[in-house]
Image: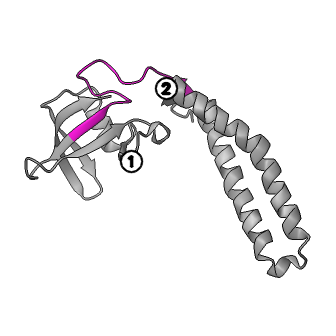
Amino acid sequence: MTETPTKLTQETHDRLSAELEDLTTRGRIEIAQAIESARALGDLSENGDYHAAKDSQGKMEARVRQLQALLKRAEIVEAGGASGVVAEGSVVTLRYEGDDDDDTQDYFVGSIEERQGDLPVASPTAPLGAALLGKVVGDVVEYKAPGGMLKVEILRIGS
């Protein structure tokens, strides 16, 4: 089964590559030192520092594997898309059907790694993100959510 490439901007690709380099060099050295220091404290079965360091090591190695896989299948794309059309990298303001006119929600359409600030992410592979791609302001799109079918109106598109 072929995995779908993750689309990243060059800026995000460079940032993630730098994070991977840091984790596999400085990060591994620091974790190894923390584990060695904790081992020196004695009995490992009741050594909280040792268990905390090993837990940190496991989380760091999981992130290393995640970044390696992500970067291996990454496809470099330009940020945003054609002006006025929802594309990966767009910030979209939506209003759900039945909500008040001033009750809107902003979403970032793209990879979680491309996230901008605290905006919720609508991945292009998720129902909402897929429904939004290629649409324009004023379009009403319908998508299947876990709770049933939802309709949203696109009020604004930015990048």
Q: How is the image coloured?
A: one colour
- Please tell me which of labels 1 and 2 falls first in the chain: 2
Q: Which residue is at a point 74% across and 57% down the rendered structure image?
A: 57
**Where is residue 36 drawn, in percent x and y?**
88, 62
Residue type indicated by callout 2: Thr
Name the dominant secondary structure of the magenta segment. Answer: loop
Name the quadrant containing residue 87.
top left
Q: 87 and 145: which one is in front?
A: 87
Residues shaded magenta:
73-93
Q: Which residue is at a point 11% across and 48% down the rendered structure image?
A: 102
The answer to whether residue 88 is above or below residue 22 is above
Q: Which residue, given by chain and number where applicable, does mark 1 sit on?
A: 118
Residue type indicated by callout 1: Asp
Real-space Cα separation, disc 1 to disc 2, in angstroms = 18 Å
Name the quadrant containing residue 42.
bottom right
Q: Is residue 92 magenta?
A: yes
